[in-house]
Amino acid sequence: MPIGRSEKDRKKMAVTKKGKEAITHFKVLKRFDDYTVLEVNIETGRTHQIRVHLSQIGYPLIGDTTYSSGKNKWGIKGQALHAKSLEFKHPITGKEMKLEAELPEYMKKLIEG
């Protein structure tokens, strides 16, 4: 779904026909009554891409005050979104870079149910 600046709220991004191509792939890892754990990969790097796409299909991120109410029974502040790994070319050397990070404890608890 293409993403561009929201016409209703200029501080937000939105799915819009005038937007730029944005490709997000996701896989359901685990379903719970109140939330779903997803693995998400993006082909494009649009501003707030994951947050906008998931909100658009009815799966806003837990704790996201911009693209959902932000209210959640788990008391999570900020989005329940974690970059397990990032891959990119270094802007100066052109070398392929891969960074990885462990899942934070609060997210491990969410995933364990």
Image (cartoon, rainbow, N blue to C red):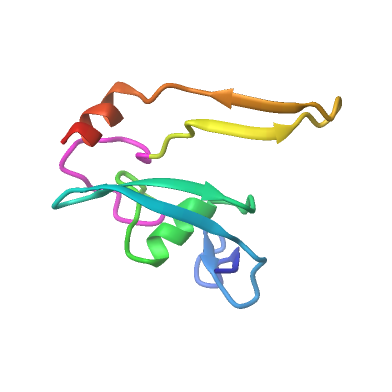
- The image position of residue 73, as x and y in percent, is 15, 42
Q: Position of residue 17 (x, y in %)?
A: 60, 78
Location of the N terminus by quadrant is bottom right
| Residue farthest bottom in this picture | 17
Query: From this viewpoint, is residue 110 visible?
Result: yes
Which image quadrant: the C terminus? top left
Confirm whether the magenta stretch covers residue 52: no
**Picture quadrant of residue 29:** top left
Q: Is residue 90 left or right of residue 69?
A: right
Main SS class of the magenta portion in the image: loop
Q: Is residue 82 above or below residue 4?
A: above
Where residue 59 sits, quadrant-wise, is bottom left
Residue occupying the far right of the picture:
93
The span shown in magenta is 66-80
Q: Is residue 11 visible?
A: no
Count of marks placed on residues: 0
Q: Residue at x 22, y 35 (%)?
A: 110
Q: Eyeballing the image, is 85 above or below 29?
A: above
Q: Is residue 76 magenta?
A: yes
Pick the front one: 63 or 2: 2
Residue at point 70% right, 35% down? 88
Image position, residue 25 (x, y; %): 50, 55
Residue at the image point whose x is 48% and y is 34% from the top: 83
Camera-side residue: 92 or 28? 28
Horizontal arrangement in the rendering, residue 100 relative to residue 90 (left or right): left
| Whether residue 54 is situated above or below residue 88 in the rendered picture | below
Residue 71 location (% of width, % of height): 23, 48
Left or right: residue 28 versus residue 11 is left
Q: Quadrant of residue 16?
A: bottom right
